[in-house]
Image: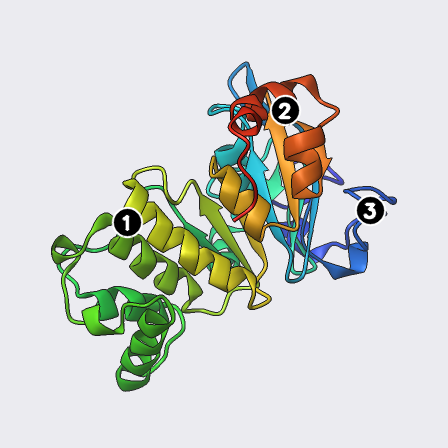
Amino acid sequence: MSAGQAEPGAVADRAVADHGDHHGGRPEEAAVVRVEKLVKCFGSNRVLDGIDLDIAKGEVVSLMGQSGGGKTTLLRCINLLEEPTEGVVEVGGEVVSKDGECLHRARRVQLRQRVGMVFQSFNLFQHLTAAENVALPLLRVGKVERAEAVRRAVDLLGRVGLADKALELPSRLSGGQQQRVAIARALALRPVAMLFDEPTSALDPESSAEVLTVMKELSTEGITMLVSTHEVGFALDASDRIVFIDRGKVVQAGPPREVVFGSASERARDFFAGFVRLGKTAG
């Protein structure tokens, strides 16, 4: 290591440099998640190309755009499932990545306690009941006693409408029910923010509606949410902002109806054109 070069992981202990007034005009002191000039490359492929984004406490932001535009990669960079190539990622006031330097591996576990993530696939343990799946992070990471972990797991399942399924194995649950168990599990450690990566993409319309209903309820409870989705109705109904990403760049961001029905971006207008032609409205 050359003189003056920071130790790997030391970035988390340094204050963020002054970012200036940007990121959609949100007050920076209120930001739970802050991303500045974020770049992610896979070889020569620049998947994220200078993303700026702030998420305020209690805000619900929908990431929209064509598949392959960088939405999932952005979510994965926030909780360090992917390591950013350049730029800054800050969560809850702590710098977790800056210019390619990221938290040490052990501290990434702490980060993922603070940032819940719900994936396209449910990622449930098939040999564990719904309650055991939800209790697992409480037992392993939260070091909660078993009786208390199970009690909290059942409460969380009730919160997503599945208290009566606590003792069922995932194989006996529908896709929508499994995804709701996954949401309950992500909530277990009381994260400062929730990340959703296309949570309804693998579901039929009825199951999708079940999951979206739960997410809408969470959006009214002051939970900070960043949601990658193609569900335009949900984005209109539950989001504070839509951020439209195309080819690794934010090309439009603003109030949901403004982005969907009156975007200044040609790419966004093309993306939402079918929805607008059908004359759909929020709800």
Mark 1 = which residue?
Answer: 123
Q: Residue 265: x, y in percent?
A: 71, 22
**What is the three-letter code of the residue carrying label 1?**
Asn
Pick the front one: 125 or 66: 66
Pick the front one: 198 or 33: 198
Would you say the residues marked 3 and 2 are in contact, meaning their CB atoms lie under 8 Å apart?
Answer: no
Whether 110 is drawn above or below 212: the answer is: below
Task: Say few, some or many: other residues with alpha carbon within 10 Å of mark 3 (under 14 / 14 to 19 / 20 or more).
Answer: few
Q: Residue at x 58, y 44 (%)?
A: 236
Mark number displayed over residue 245 = none
Mark 2 = which residue?
Answer: 268
Mark 3 = which residue?
Answer: 25
Residue 61 visible: yes
Cα–Cα span, label 1 and label 3? 36 Å
Looking at marks 1 and 3 on the same chain, the residue that comes earlier in the sequence is marked by: 3
**What is the three-letter code of the residue carrying label 3?**
Gly
Q: Residue at x 63, y 40 (%)?
A: 242
Residue 28 lies left or right of residue 282; in this view the side is: right
